[in-house]
Image (spheres, rainbow, N blue to C red):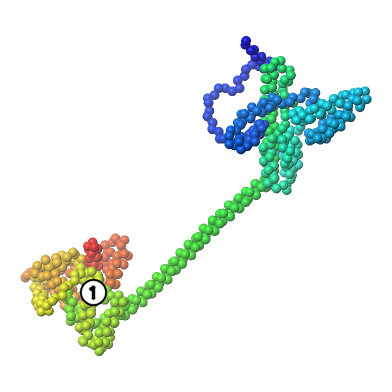
Amino acid sequence: MATALLLPPPPPDYAGPEVKAPVCPLVRKEFEAGGRAFEQLLCTFLGIEGEADTDESLAGQRTSSKAKMQQQKKKGLQSVKLTDDELAVDHYEVLELGKLQWNATEDQIKTAYRRLVVETHPDKTQGGDDTAFKAVQKAYEILSDPQKRLAFDSSIDFDDDIPSLKVAPENFYEVFGDAFHRNSRWSTSRNVPMLGDDSTPIEEVEKFYDFWFTFKSWRDFSHVDTHTIEEADCREEKRWMEKENARERAKLQRQENKRIFTLTERAKMLDPRIKRHKEEQARKKEEEKKAAEAEKQRQREERARLEREKKEAEEKRLKEEAAQKKAEQKKRKEEAKRTRERCVKALKPFVLEEVNRELSDEGVCKPDMEYLFGKLDLEKLQALEEALIEIATKCDCAMPDLTAACRGPVVAHINELITSTEQAAGFDRFGNRYVAKKDTDKPEEAKATKSSAKVEDKWTEQELVDLGKAIAKFPGGSFNRWDNIAAYIGTKTPDQVLRRTKLMTHQLHAGEVAKPEIFKQGDAKPLQEEKKEPAVDMVWSKAQQKELEDALKQLKDYKEKDKWDKIAALVTGKSKKECVERYKYLATMLKKK
């Protein structure tokens, strides 16, 4: 058997189906989860009672918002609906509790009922009128039942207005205080915090707003139901009416929650205490920010000051050390100069004008003397002076007037110094790599070799001409220069070539003889002078070497043609040619290393 479903009649203003929104494409939107706190606030705002969290609910399943809404709807279906006649009477006035109204307690209601039920009993009234007695009975029946009393209290006229945002600051506590006090009647909690005054601590103010933002109301809207369930013709219509009434009550509950939330929000926006607190927080934050920035600035300045002081102290120390070092160097230089002058004066009688490649027992040639004094520092000069003094003491004379008796020991000591200096430098005084010489076992053979060398040292005119050409062909600094010159001449050894070259250079610089016409070839006319100068002097003192190095550093970026002229002008006692040859020689030595 089929079941017929009766639909309710359409409302009088029904004009047919109506399209609320056109069909549109699906739009994807992203939503951020609000969390449990937001869910609880939303439930409060929608009028849905949330369940208290327990350990079991935290550990297990938790009732969803949809389930809560369904429970609330079921609760709404079971709400008590008072009749219009029951709502038309002020039951508090009937029990003589009109001044207390909804603030009356259960004990006060019971006490008033027991007193009035005796006073209004028909047996104690004239004519046996039971109207008052029935009214007392009805009032107690409604006010003693929590659900009926809740429905009756919610039906009492109430001012739902909330203050606007245009309330003056001086009237804030009065206007909003009265609004919160008026709405506190709907709170499910008995301990409702009030707005307070301007002196209320900020902690209590924050607790006040926390309470009202999560305000839970017991207000019931069953008295405004649209449909009367008793008028339903069948069970299906009754259910439909109940659902419609529940939907309408939920809508009114959401409006009520929104009204309370708006009231709290406006109050917080206009609250002078909140404004002062925010300003104070902002001021403290700004002060903390400025203090932190000032501290950072102070630390930066302190670091800069310490670095500056450290740098100044370091510069001062370096300047003092440089000045002290310079003063010591100057002092050592002056002392070395004086010591050198004394030694040179003392050794003057033992200096030979003849230039020899080999060291002589009869004296010390001038280039060898210059080479030696160019290598000795202050300590070695002082040691030389002490040695000369010791020799003078043994020979019964005094510095600097050394006698002929001192020649042998003095010359031997000087030769020993020259040899040790060459050995330490790795090069001999002529610029060649130092090679230790072996002592001759037989003095007769050495004497014979020396005499034969003197005989072989004689040069013919053609050999001198070839020597001049070879010197021009192989300039100073050339690799194996003396071997190449000897090979070019063909009749002389490298030692003979070197001795002859040193002798000619010494004679030319000393001005003892005119420039000889030795560069002749047979009976031909004298050859024109070579554009290049003859052999250059390879003996450089330590001071001259230092001047050459400084000049090269000073003019390293100079690109003009007269660069070597300027360099030669900065080196004492050396020509442009000698500076160039010295530079080439040093470059060759560096390549060999």
Residue lying furthest bottom: 396
- Residue found at x 74% / y 45%: 197
Snapshot quadrant of residue 41: top right
Regarding residue 557, the answer to whether it shows in the image is: yes
- From the viewer's perspective, is residue 309 above or below residue 499? above
Which x, y percent locates residue 152?
77, 29
- Residue found at x 25% / y 88%: 397
* Observer-nearest of 47 and 276: 47
Quadrant of the drawing holding the N terminus: top right
Which x, y percent locates residue 540?
25, 71
Residue at numbered disc 1: 420
Mark 1 belongs to which amino acid? Ser
Which x, y percent locates residue 22?
57, 22
Quadrant of the drawing holding the C terminus: bottom left
Q: Is residue 117 left or right of residue 386?
A: right
- From the viewer's perspective, is residue 75 above or below residue 485? above
Q: Is residue 137 left or right of residue 466?
A: right
Q: Is residue 383 left or right of residue 272?
A: left
Snapshot quadrant of residue 482: bottom left
* Observer-nearest of 262 and 404: 262
- From the viewer's perspective, is residue 340 above or below residue 282? below
Regarding residue 104, the answer to whether it shows in the image is: no
- Residue found at x 93% / y 25%: 126
